[in-house]
Amino acid sequence: MIGGGAGGLVTAASAVGQGAKVALIEKNLLGGDCLNTGCVPSKAFLKCANVAHNARTAEQFGVKIGQVEVDFPFIMERMRKIRASISDNDSAARFSKQLNVDVYLGHAKFFDQTHITVNDKKLNFLKAVVATGARPKVPKINGLDSVTYFTSESIFNLKKQPKSIAILGGGPVAVELGQAFQRLGTKVTFIVRGDQLIGREDFDVSNLLYK
C-alpha cells in the first residue's frame, strides 16, 4: 500500500480484515490531506467562521448580541487541538500494533513487478495499491516565487489573521476558504480565470454565491 491518506488507510485496514499481510508506505504524514490539511482542519475552521456569521446576523431572529470580536489565534489553536485529538486513529502505532500492518515511513519505489523498495529495504508484494492522492498545483505566475503565498496545504499554519487575502482560483476549496476568512473579518479578493466561481457547476448554482 503506497500512500497513508484516507484511501490508503481504509484499504489497508480492509485488506487486513480479509486476511492479507499488508505493508503501508507513507513519505509524509499519515492521515493524508483529510486529517492534516483538508477535511478536519477546514471544517473546524469553517465552524468558527459560521458561528461568527451567525452572531452578526442573529438580530434577524430577535437575538441582539452586539459587537462581535474574533480571536483568530484561538480559532487556529482550537483547530490544531481538534486535529491532534483524533490523530491517533490514523497513527502508525494504531496500524502497526492494533491492526498488524507493517508501516514504513519513507519514499516508495517500484523495483520490479513483485518488489518495491523503501528506505533501502526491498519488500515483496502480490498486489500493490497506489493511493498517493494529489497536491495543490502552484500556477506559473511571474513574481509569485518572490512573495509569501499559501496553498490549501499550508494555509492552516497561520497564527495571525491577515487583514486582506487574494485567492487565485474559484473552485470549491477556494470559495470555502474565502467565505470563511471573510466571515472572520478578512477582506477577500478572488482572482478567477473563468467567468464564474465554481466553474464546473451550473451557472444558476454559481450565481447564488454572488447574492
Image (cartoon, helix red, strand yellow):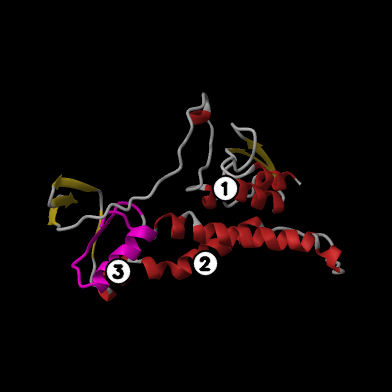
Viewer-proximal residue, 94 or 132? Answer: 132
Q: Which residues are magenta?
A: 1-28
Per the image, label 3 sits on a secondary structure element best described as helix
Q: Which residue is mark 3?
A: 14
Q: Position of residue 182 (x, y in %)?
A: 69, 49
Q: Residues within 10 Å of mark 2 (few under 14, many from 20)?
A: some
Marks 1 and 2, how far apart at CA = 23 Å
Cβ–Cβ under 8 Å for marks 2 and 3 = no
Q: Position of residue 159 (x, y in %)?
A: 58, 52
Viewer-proximal residue, 109 or 145? Answer: 109
Cβ–Cβ under 8 Å for marks 3 and 1 = no
Marks 3 and 1, how far apart at CA = 30 Å
Per the image, label 2 sits on a secondary structure element best described as helix
Per the image, label 1 sits on a secondary structure element best described as helix
Judge left or right: residue 28 versus residue 106: right
Q: Which mark is residue 139?
A: none
Identify the residue at image location x=45%, y=69%.
86
N-terminal of the pair, mark 1 or mark 2, is 2
Identify the residue at image location x=68%, y=42%.
188
- Residue 46 shows in the view: yes
Label 3 sits on what residue type? Ser
Label 2 sits on what residue type? Ile
Q: Which mark is residue 172?
A: 1
- Residue 30 shows in the view: no
Q: Which residue is mark 2?
A: 82
On screen, residue 204 above or below 88: above
Nearest-to-viewer mark from 2 and 3: 3
